[in-house]
Image (cartoon, helix red, strand yellow):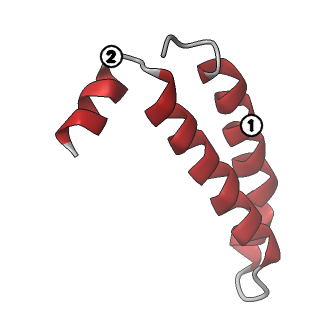
């Protein structure tokens, strides 16, 4: 866990891509759930934020 946090602090690609992927997945789950309209309303923004984040962090060093 500490190595993961250290790599986040040093702006390494692997951990940040994982965070971006989790954000995209969270947005998809928010989009497909039928219970809370507020979550559905924010799902597209969360997916877009994760996608933009993934594009940015793909340029980080390994």
Task: Give percent across and percent down for residue 31.
Answer: 80, 69
Tell us which disc is closer to us: 2 or 1. 2
Horizontal side of residue 36 vs 10, given as left or right: right
Q: On screen, 32 above or below 58?
A: below
Q: On screen, 14 above or below 45?
A: above
Q: On screen, 14 above or below 26?
A: above
Residue in the image at 81% along x and 76% along y: 32
Task: Give percent across and percent down for residue 16.
Answer: 49, 32
Instruction: Give the label on residue 37, or none.
Output: none
- Where on the picture, by quarter, is residue 6? top left
Horizontal side of residue 21 vs 3, given as left or right: right
Q: Residues within 10 Å of mark 1 (few under 14, many from 20)?
A: some
Residue in the image at 33% along x and 16% along y: 10
Q: Which residue is mark 1?
A: 51
Say which of 54 and 39 sits in front.
54
Instruction: Give the label on residue 10, or none.
Output: 2
Q: Residue furthest bottom?
A: 35
How far is mark 2 from mark 1, CA to CA?
A: 21 Å
Q: Residue furthest left?
A: 2
Q: Are marks 2 and 1 in contact (CB under 8 Å)?
A: no
Q: Secondary structure at mark 2?
A: loop
Task: Give percent across and percent down for residue 22.
Answer: 58, 52
Q: Secondary structure at mark 1?
A: helix
Mark nearer the N terminus (2 vs 1): 2
Q: On screen, 28 above or below 45?
A: below
Residue in the image at 44% along x and 35% along y: 15
Number of numbered discs visible in the structure rendering = 2
Horizontal side of residue 8 vs 59, given as left or right: left
Task: Give percent across and percent down for residue 27.
Answer: 71, 59
Q: Residues within 10 Å of mark 2 (few under 14, many from 20)?
A: few
Residue in the image at 79% along x and 64% along y: 41
């Amino acid at each position: 866990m500490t190595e993961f946090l250290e790599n986040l602090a040093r702006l390494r690609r692997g951990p940040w891509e994982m965070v971006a992927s989790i954000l995209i997945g969270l947005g998809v789950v928010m989009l497909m759930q039928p219970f809370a309209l507020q979550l559905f309303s924010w799902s597209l923004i969360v997916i877009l934020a994760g996608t933009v984040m993934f594009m940015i962090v793909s340029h980080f060093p390994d």
